Image: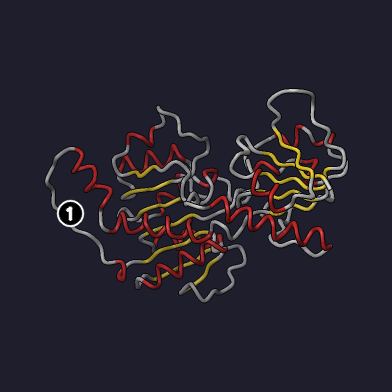
Amino acid sequence: MKALLVARDPSPVLPIVQDRWADIEWVVLPKAEGPKPDLRGVEVAFMWDFRSKLLRQYWASLPDLRWVHVGAAGVDAMVFPELLESDVILTNARGAFDEPVAEFGLALILMFAKRLNETMINQVERRWKHEETQLLSERTVAIIGFGAIGHLIGRKCRALGMRVVGVRLSGEAHPDADEMHTIDELDSVLENSDYVVLVLPQTQETQLVMGDAQLRRMRPDAVLINIGRGSAVDEIALAAALEAGTIRGAASDVFQREPLAEDHPLWAQRNAVITPHMAFDVDRWQRRVVDGFSENLARYRAGEPLINQIDKSKGY
């Protein structure tokens, strides 16, 4: 059996998969030098580099491909017509990053509630300035995208006494939310929330969910936190809202283009927290991703259904 590993730097993962699956012939892309690799017979592609466009580039050379596994929760780079129209199964690493991202979201809520972002700026500027902080048990958090990560954030926030309002397509109730709404009810949710946390996948339906009109619906003392996809937020409108004081603050770990350009207006906002797409990136994450792939590879070879299958028509 042949399998393809797509990785800009294969050194962290190639020895692991070779050790676990010694009977598999591993082909690595990109190939640094030499002739074009022979991809005939490759049944499985492990996209360690989840942003890579190489799969589409080499698609015609992969006639035997049956399954693509993405080493991340997002499968944005895999949403290309040839794959979508094929019978190739697409899976992701859903579950490996749920707890890390949920913890990161909670940390950002706590940062703003306790004004640690402002206090750190004051420290750098050697300014002794007292700040009043918030009691989270008196606050409401809206979680837009109440999936695997969203409900974990909800559970952690409820443990701190927060009121949790969820938003998801179905609007179906969930035990980790005090109330649930559909996306059509987003305006009323925004008007009544102290913290708005976006945990949305990148789809046509989630494109620019938070634009100028939605930001104006938020309360002036509210905070927007985006740990889902950069495509969900109009970043120029967000920078303008922060500068005008339309909302109290914002934190984003994801952006429409990464890295964020040095001249982007968000950098200039003192009430913005910018992190470099690191919510999921905890220590020992590589082993967790490989464990998930290995479980699915064992299922594939046994002819069993794969876990974390993506609905290619929806993109998640």
Residue occupying the point 34% across, 55% down: 222
Left or right of residue 16: residue 238 = left
Residue 306 x %, y %: 75, 61
Q: Examine the rendered structure and indicate whether residue 241 appears above or below residue 113.
A: above
Residue 61 x %, y %: 84, 34
Residue occupying the point 71% across, 56% down: 310
Residue that sits furthest to the top in the current view: 34
Residue 167 x %, y %: 52, 63
Mark 1: few/some/many CA within 10 Å (<14, 14-19, 20+): few
Q: Nearer the viewer, residue 75 or 191?
A: 75
For the C terminus, the image quarter is bottom right
Residue occupying the point 83% across, 36% down: 39
Residue that sits furthest to the bottom in the current view: 175
Total residue callouts: 1
Q: Nearer the viewer, residue 156 or 2?
A: 2
Residue 71 x %, y %: 63, 49
**Residue type (three-letter) at the residue carrying disc 1:** Glu
Q: Examine the rendered structure and indicate whether residue 177 appears above or below residue 111.
A: below
Location of residue 168 by image quarter: bottom right
Q: Examine the rendered structure and indicate whether residue 233 appears above or below residue 190.
A: above
Q: Nearer the viewer, residue 53 or 38?
A: 38
Residue bearing the label numbered 1: 131
* Circle 1 SS class: loop
Residue occupying the point 45% across, 70% down: 155
Location of residue 276 by image quarter: top left
